[in-house]
Image: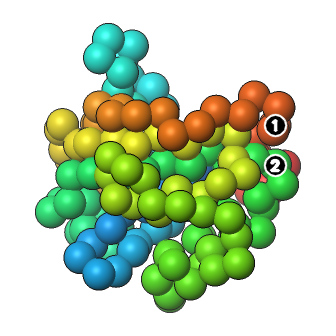
Amino acid sequence: MGEVAPAEFTEALAAFATGVVVVTVRDGRDDIGTTLTAFGSVSLAPPMVLIGVGTGSYLGEVLQRCDRWAVTVLSAAQRVIAGRFAAAGRPSARLLIAGEPHHRGAGSGALVIEGGSAALECETRQRVPAGDHVLFIAEVLAIDYVDAGRPPLIRVNRRYR
């Protein structure tokens, strides 16, 4: 078998529908956040999740020194928020959600976006290098909210739905 071409790999994975989350972390006086689709559950006892973050990303750099963070599972109505947090050169997370309902998580100190399908506060337990990403495996400290009545935002074939 030959080497898998990055473009072919990207094309194949675009066909896989995945949920969309925004991960936020408080870094001193600033708030950092980004849109991710590399999110999943790891363990029920203790409750653990993981996120995959690019090794060269600013979020990845901040998560190397800040263990507590929040993840908001975006609802289908939050497509605009997903786009804001995915844009290159984006400003502070506080500016990206100005005018949007949000609060600071009691356990993580990170911004939690309201109106999503769910929100979790997490603490990193392991960092695992994986190719051009780092997997941050975290224990869930608290479930901030769950709103099963809000359908989740998904990404498939390079589009939000």
Please name the amino acid that badge 1 sits on.
Pro
Residue 148 in percent (x, y) is at 75, 28
* 104 is higher (above) or lower (below) than 29: above
Q: Which mark is residue 48?
A: none
Residue that carries the numbered disc 2 in the rendered image: 76
| Local crowd size for mark 2, using a 10 Å CA cut-off: few (<14), some (14–19), many (≥20) | many
Residue that carries the numbered disc 1 in the rendered image: 151
* 15 is higher (above) or lower (below) than 133: above
The residue lying furthest to the top in this view is 45
The answer to whether residue 48 of the structure is visible from this angle is yes
Earlier sequence position, callout 2 versus callout 1: 2
**Residue drawn at 34 percent across, 80 percent down:** 30
Write down the quadrant of residue 154 in the picture: top right
Please name the amino acid that badge 2 sits on.
Ala
* 80 is higher (above) or lower (below) than 125: below
In the displayed structure image, the side of residue 97 where residue 137 appears, left or right: left
Instruction: Quote the CA–CA distance across marks 2 and 1.
Output: 6 Å
Residue 100 in percent (x, y) is at 70, 70
